[in-house]
């Protein structure tokens, strides 16, 4: 996010294309078999030069570039070097190595050669086994043979490759870099104290939009940054994995460098405040291509938008993806929210109750909306570095803009922020006409300028349009839920009321009679992780709905 005092222009780069970081889950063989690490070789990355990094960060801030959270350190480890093979009794074998970047708060691995044969698997985990990424399989292979993982807390991680005897010698695994995170990671001081967790009461009516927002990890050479983005719907209703963010998050970056961008879903606290637990940051996808952009230097002569499409066409259902709706009419809006990842922290919500004002960011008039935030029950809800590219939702729960920057902060809660207009993104920016947003969000040229969002636009869901048609939304907390969800019922209850739980295909999962009480506890321990819709019906007529996310720690 651009700022006067603390600018955040996010530039991006790294290496070549790869597949989504979708994994099979489970535990690696080494942990299941209780194999110790005493004999596993330790491979250290190139030393982290904190003094040089501090000087580089200062220079980047002076140049109005994004503050980094990590640097990529060189390392060399693979099946032919650095690790140890273990022969198993049935003829299969295991390769393990412990990779260390001394002093890192967290590590991420970058593979220059990644080609797994059928039935082989690869895991990355913390030395104590508390955090596990994987298993990765042949599904994760890419044509270019590159790959990357999300974060493991601490300075060390264990890389484990399991190879069945039937495919011995076929696999190729080579790690060439370790992302050394030195700030803005889980457990470190992140966003300002005035920020409001998205699962506080301020977010009660914004659960679908919450599930559309992702944290984006971006790499520029050795430096790694955070931006925010939003999964966005299109009028073809085809579940295309389009992510909308800011052009300044990718300004000047070659197309091949987008392939190690990481998209984190559901990175948020389960409840409100630091005392509540967090969703694990493992629901990720890696790699994308650039589709549309404002071609404006990041807002200097336009509205500063970037549209990306994930390399993998299908987002796993347990990520609970919501394709957000949007409004490109250019109408002034009164009241709404921004949902974002300040400093890469867990998802936050900022609220405005006034009206958007048309304004200018660069030299072209009326490209942006100016917004001032409103203090709410749990904080001021401003924006910070890392919020760049996040969506501004109007009262109808549709995107009307994307964040370029501003001067709001916990120390300056009355200062404004500036969002590039969806109406300007649509077809008014400079550059080639085939890069404008309408080409992708209205692929059949219907002329429609607004649409609602949905959890499964290409299926048969009860989506946000249906929720709005009902007119009443149930209050559900906590959401996500583990063992049970407490539902606040409408004041007027009548005999014959039932509560239905439906999956995102509209299928009935559970039904329970509801008695006339103010609150109702719904058991969720037996439900599989994922997204559901709660439907309150009286004599078969739908009276109220709410989305429900089930997540078991």
Image (spheres, rainbow, N blue to C red):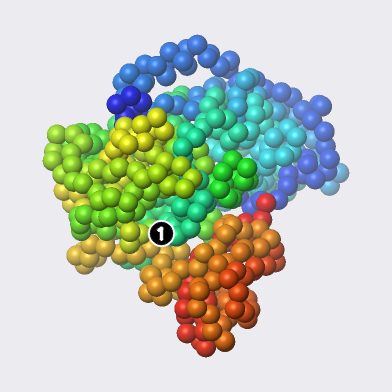
Label 1 environment density (alpha carbons within 10 Å; few <14, some 14–19, many ≥20): many
Instruction: Give the residue at x 70% y 50%.
Output: 26
Q: Is residue 502 left or right of residue 256?
A: right
Comparing 166 with 210, the one in front is 210
At horizontal 38% and vertical 63% (from top left) the residue drawn is 453
Left or right: 454, with 498 as reference point = left
Percent coordinates x, y for residue 383 in the rendering: 39, 38
- Which quadrant of the figure has residue 454? bottom left
The residue beneath circle 1 is 323
Residue sitting at 49 percent across and 35 percent down? 193
Up the image or down, 495 lies above or below 415; here it is below
On the image, the x and y values in percent for residue 81 come to 67, 25
Tell me: residue 100, above or below residue 237. Answer: above
Q: Residue furthest top?
A: 51
Q: In the picture provided, is 245 more to the left or to the right than 31? A: left
Residue pictured at 20% horizontal, 49% vertical: 424
* Observer-nearest of 204 and 178: 204
Q: Which of 31 and 78 is in front in this view?
A: 31
Quarter of the image for the N terminus: give it: top left
x and y percentages locating residue 304 in the rendered image: 26, 40
Q: Which residue is at the far right? A: 89
Figure label count? 1
Local SS, label 1: loop
Of 541 and 131, the residue lying toward us: 541
Q: In which quarter of the image is residue 334?
A: bottom left
Return the x and y of residue 64 as percentages of the image width and height: 31, 24
Residue 233 in view here: no
Regarding residue 374, the answer to whether it shows in the image is yes
Q: Quadrant of residue 447?
A: bottom left
């Amino acid at each position: 996010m651009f700022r006067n005092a603390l600018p955040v222009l996010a530039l991006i780069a790294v290496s070549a294309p790869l597949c989504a970081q979708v994994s099979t889950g489970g535990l690696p063989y080494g942990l299941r078999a209780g194999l110790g690490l005493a004999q596993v070789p330790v491979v250290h990355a190139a030393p982290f030069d904190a003094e040089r990094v501090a000087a580089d960060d200062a220079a980047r801030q002076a140049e109005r570039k994004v503050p980094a959270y990590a640097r990529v350190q060189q390392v060399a480890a693979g099946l032919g070097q650095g690790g140890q093979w273990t022969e198993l009794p049935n003829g299969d074998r295991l390769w393990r190595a412990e990779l260390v970047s001394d002093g890192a708060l967290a590590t991420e691995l970058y593979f220059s050669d990644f080609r797994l044969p059928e039935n082989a698997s690869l895991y990355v985990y913390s030395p104590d086994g508390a955090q596990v990424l994987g298993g990765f399989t042949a599904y994760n292979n890419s044509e270019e043979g590159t790959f990357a993982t999300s974060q493991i807390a601490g300075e060390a991680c264990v890389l484990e490759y399991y190879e069945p005897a039937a495919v011995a010698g076929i696999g190729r695994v080579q790690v060439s870099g370790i992302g050394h995170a030195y700030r803005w990671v889980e457990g470190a001081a992140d966003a300002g104290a005035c920020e409001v967790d998205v699962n506080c009461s301020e977010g009660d009516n914004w659960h679908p939009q919450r599930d559309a927002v992702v944290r984006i990890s971006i790499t520029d050479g050795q430096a790694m940054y955070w931006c925010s983005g939003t999964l966005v719907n299109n009028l073809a209703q085809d579940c295309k994995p389009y992510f909308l963010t800011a052009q300044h998050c990718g300004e000047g970056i070659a197309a091949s460098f987008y392939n190690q961008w990481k998209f984190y879903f559901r990175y948020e606290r389960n409840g409100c405040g630091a005392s509540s637990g967090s969703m694990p940051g493992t629901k990720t996808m890696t790699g994308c291509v650039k589709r549309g952009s404002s071609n404006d230097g990041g807002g200097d002569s336009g509205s500063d938008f970037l549209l990306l499409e994930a390399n993998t066409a299908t987002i796993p259902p347990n990520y609970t993806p919501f394709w957000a709706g949007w409004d490109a009419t250019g109408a002034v809006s009164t009241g709404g929210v921004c949902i974002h990842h300040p400093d890469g922290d867990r998802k936050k919500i900022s609220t405005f109750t006034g009206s958007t004002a048309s304004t200018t960011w660069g030299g072209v008039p009326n490209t942006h909306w100016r917004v001032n935030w409103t203090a709410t029950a749990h904080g001021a809800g401003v924006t910070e570095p890392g919020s760049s590219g996040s969506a501004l939702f109007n009262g109808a729960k549709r995107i009307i803009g994307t964040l370029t920057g501003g001067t709001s902060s916990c120390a300056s809660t009355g200062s404004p922020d500036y969002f590039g207009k969806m109406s300007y993104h649509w077809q008014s920016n400079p550059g080639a006409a085939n890069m404008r947003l309408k080409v992708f969000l209205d692929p059949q040229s219907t002329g429609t300028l607004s649409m609602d969002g949905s959890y499964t636009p290409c299926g048969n869901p009860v989506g946000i349009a249906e929720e709005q048609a009902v007119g009443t939304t149930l209050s559900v907390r906590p959401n996500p839920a583990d063992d049970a969800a407490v539902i606040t019922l409408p004041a007027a209850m009548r005999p014959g009321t039932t509560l239905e739980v439906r999956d995102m295909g509209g299928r009935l999962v559970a039904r329970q009679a509801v008695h006339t009480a103010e609150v109702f506890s719904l058991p969720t321990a037996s439900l599989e992780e994922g997204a559901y819709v709660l439907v309150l019906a009286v004599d078969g007529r739908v009276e109220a709905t709410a989305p429900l996310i089930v997540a078991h720690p």
